[in-house]
Image: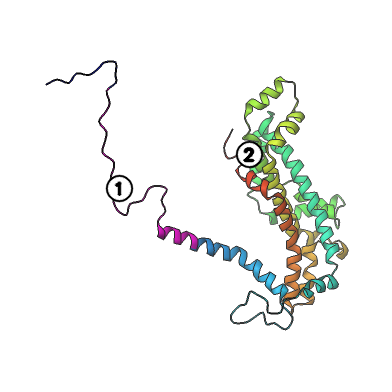
Amino acid sequence: MSIVTDPARPAVAPEAPPATRRKGSFGFNTISTREKVVRYVLLVFVLLITIGPFLWQLSTSLKGSGEDIYTRIPRLLPAQPTLDHYGAVADTIPVWDYAKNSLVVAVLVVGGNVLGASLAGFALSRLQFRGRRIVLGLFLATLVLPGEVTIISQYVTVREFGLANTLFGVALPGMIGALNVLLMYNAFRALPIEVDQAAIVDGANAWQRFVYIGLPSVRGTISVVAIFAFIGAWDDFLWPLIVLTDPNKYTLTVGLQYLSGTFSNNPRLIAAGTMIAFVPIVIVFATLQRFFFKGVEEGAVKG
């Protein structure tokens, strides 16, 4: 018995029986209950490690003088909350002058990194010149060296320039970071080369391509560079301690050591000073966070 098929109509394969799923099996996107529990346990553990010290310092700064902060069972919530320790910090040391000095250094470092790293990253990624690969290799090589290796040469250079005991001398070595240059290089490199070629055809020079095409496309990475530069300059302790000799020019991290030396038996004041130093970092990150998470992904995939 022969089966006659219509040549104009394609043959249809017989429908396969629906696949039967065995009980207890999971798909690729399905997470078992045990795996969920493990994930949440790890997340809570990481949260305690990262946020726990901050919450403990905040709690210590708010506890009254009559509370015992060294109890066998730690208490996070203060029984006698007070803000007197913050006022005591301002009465003990010129904390606002130190904060102003730190802000000056941070602004110089952030400005230098945003402008210098952007120019260097654009030149290394979008311009063709002799020795470009060598310069890029030198930037990569500097990441291997720890900061303590070059700190003596940096101090000698700053002193020879007559910038010792100045805020500009504190900011100068960090005004262009090698890591920030590489971040900007990677962000500019991800831009389609056809955009540059079209701009060149229209008569745009390198500066115009940098200002009108490059910078608007890498705003997220610029925010990442700005946050990293600000945190690094604001939290730096060793370099300002070496360069500055006048107490009136101390940055906040160096000036807060007076609390540790004068009030070593009162950790509440030290905790309050730590919180004062931490507030500007929170403000900067809260301001730039919407660009920060966008900048983390820039340069990962070429357009």
What amino acid is labelled 2 in the image? Asn
Q: Would residue 171 appear left or right of 190 to someone viewing this image? A: right
Q: How far from the left and from the top, in percent, is residue 141?
A: 64, 45
- Model colouring: rainbow
Note whether residue 47 is visible. yes
Q: Earlier in the sequence, mark 1 or mark 2?
A: 1
Q: Number of labelled discs?
A: 2
Extreme residue in the bottom direction: 66
Q: State whether the magenta stretch is mostly helix, strand or loop.
A: loop
Q: How far from the left and from the top, in percent, is residue 244?
A: 83, 60
| Residue at image location 65% in from the left, 71% down from the top | 56
The N terminus - image quarter: top left
| Residue at image location 72% in from the left, 39% down from the top | 118
Checking the image for residue 21, the label placed there is 1
Q: How far from the left and from the top, in percent, is residue 124?
A: 68, 35
Q: Is residue 254 above or below residue 13?
A: below
Q: Which residues are magenta?
A: 11-40
What amino acid is labelled 1 in the image? Arg
Q: Would residue 139 appear left or right of 103 to someone viewing this image? A: left
Q: Which residue is mark 2?
A: 186
| Residue at image location 70% in from the left, 24% down from the top | 199
Q: How far from the left and from the top, in percent, is residue 106?
A: 78, 53
